[in-house]
Amino acid sequence: MGLLFAAWCILLHAHKVAVLDDAAYAAGVPDGGVRSASAVAARLLFWAGLPGSAWLAHRGNADTASSSEPPPPRDADMMVAIEPLTRSRQPFGALPRNASVGLAYAALAKAYTAPFRAFGGIPRALFMDVLERGEGVGYCATCFLVQVKTNTIYVYDPRGVRNRMSPFHALRMREVLLWTKLALRRGRIGDTEFVVSVTDTVASTRCAHPYRLATPEATPRPIFTIVHCNVSDNIPFPMFAGDLLRRAFPAEFWTDRGGRVSRWDAKMAAHATSAADVPWVAKQPRAVFRGVVRVSAAAANASAFHATCGTLGRPALAARSAGRPHLFDVEIEGVCGHTTHTARRLTAHQQSAYRYGVYVEGNGFWADRLVLQLFGASATFYQLTPCGLFFEPLLRPYEHVIPVDYHFRDLERQVVWARHHDAAARRVAVQGRAFASEYLSTAGIRSYAEAILLEYTKLLHDRNITIVPGAKKY
C-alpha cells in the first residue's frame, strides 16, 4: 500500500483562494467588499504542461520581432525551472485544441475523474465518510450533500451552510444548486449524489505536502470543491460567479441575494467593453497589479509567512518588481512582517490602461480575479500555482496567458519579452478574452457542470439514491 501511495503521489505532483476582497480590489472597489478571512489553503498551480505538452511550449514563432532579450523559456527549460509541485497534477493527455467548448470540457471532466476510474469507481463511503466525520482531523466544516432523484434536487445541510455561515458560503451553495439544475436539463445525468465543500480550498489531500492544507490520507475523496489542487483528488465545480460579482461590483450586487448568475453574461460583457475602451496603442507597456497582502498557503502558518516576507505571494511580486517603474506599476496594501504597505487605488478602467496585468495568488494559491482579467483587454501574466478553478487546464501559454514562475523569478524577463513582441502580447490579450467569452459564459459553465456530473455519476457504485432523512427539496 505504501508503494502504491508513493507512486500515486508522484503522478499527482504537478497540477492550481483568492478570497476576501480580492476581486473587489482587482476591480478598483474600495474596502466595502471585504469579507473576513476564514479558510485559505491550496494552490501552487498545475498548469505547466497541462493541455498536452502545449502548456509551457514557446509560441513566439508567431511574432518574430527582433530583440536582444532572450525569448520565453521553452518547454524543457521551464520544467527544470519550476518546482515539481507546480507541474501537471496528472497525465491529462492531449486535451482538444480546436474542439468545441462541450468537447473540451468533456475531455477535462474525464481527466478530473480519472483517479476514481483507476480506483475502480466511487463507493458511497468515499464521500459520505467526509460528510459524517466529527470535528477534528479531516472535519469538513462547510460540507453538504446534494442528491438528485427523478430529476428533483434535494439538499442535506447538517452544518447549516445555507443559514448559519458567511454570505459567501450560502452564495456558493446556491450557485452549486443552480448549475446542477441547469446541468440536468438535457436528461443525460439521471439520479446521482455528491458532497460539496464551499470553503476556499480542497477538503482533502492525497499526498504529503508542506502546505496549509488538509492532512493527507491514502483514500481518494471525490468531494466537489471550488478549486483543484496538485495534492488532491477533489473535483472542481463552478461556484465562484455569484460571490465574484458581489465583491467586484458591490454597488450592483452586494445586497442582491438572488439572480446574480442570471446577470453574469451581461455583466462580463459590460466589463469587457469597458476594458476595451482604451486602445492597445494607448496602453502603457507596463504590468499592473493592485491587491491586499494575503498569507500564502505555501507558508505553514501566518508566522512563517511574516518571517519570510518578500519570498511568497503578493509581497514576493512587490519585491521582484521594486525599482523597475519602466516595467511595473505594482502596489500592495497591508502588513507583511514589520512592513506596512500602502497602495494607490486604481479602478478597473484605470487598470485597463496597461497592456499587461499580473495574476497573483491570494490566501491559498489561487484568486478569482483571474476571471475578470481574462474578460479584460490586457495580456495576463499568469503565476503558476498549485491550485486553480475548473477551467484553467484549458488555458494555453502564449495563447491565452503568459506564464510566470511561482516565485516570479522570470517575471521581468517575460515582461521584457512582451514589450519586444508587442503583436504576440496583444494576441494573448485578444485570445484570452475570446476564451473567457466562450468557456466562461453561462452556456460554457453549464456545459462543464453537465460534463463533470455525467462522468462522476457514471462511476458511482450505487445509483439507487435514497433521500436521507432531513434533506430538503431545492
Image: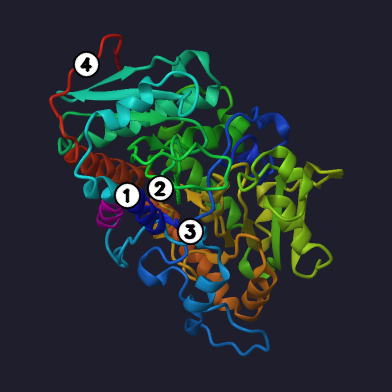
Q: How far apart are marks 4 and 2 (CA)?
A: 28 Å
List the residue tagged with mark 3: 433
List the residue tagged with mark 2: 390
Mark 1 residue element: helix
| Vertical side of 190 occupied by 10: above or below | below
Mark 2 residue element: loop
| Vertical side of 365 occupied by 190: above or below | above
Can the viewer see residue 58? no
The residue located at (76%, 63%) in the rendering is 321
Q: On the rendered image, what quadrant is the C terminus found in? A: top left
Q: Is the residue marked by circle 1 packed among few (<14), some (14-19), or many (20+) residues within 10 Å?
A: many
Query: Residue most toward the front?
Result: 2
Q: Distance between the residues labelled 1 and 3?
A: 25 Å
Q: Is the residue marked by circle 2 packed among few (<14), some (14-19), or many (20+) residues within 10 Å?
A: many
The residue located at (65%, 36%) in the rendering is 21
Closer to the chain start, of discs 4 and 2, is 2
Q: Is residue 54 left or right of residue 42?
A: left
Q: Is the residue marked by circle 4 packed among few (<14), some (14-19), or many (20+) residues within 10 Å?
A: some
Q: Which amino acid does label 2 sit on?
A: Phe
Residue 33 position by quadrant? top right
Q: What x and y, as percent, mark residue 311?
A: 72, 56
Q: What residue type is labelled 4?
A: Ile
Q: What stretch of residues is rendered in magenta?
A: 102-111
Kindly check if marks 4 and 3 are in contact, taking CB atoms under 8 A apart as contact: no
The nearer-to-camera label among 2 and 3 is 2
Q: What x and y, as percent, mark residue 351?
A: 68, 54
Q: How far apart are marks 2 and 3 (CA)?
A: 17 Å
Residue 358 position by quadrant? bottom right
Task: In the rendered structure, find residue 42 and report the number of the disc placed on it.
Answer: none
Task: Decide whether residue 324 is among the magenta residues.
Answer: no
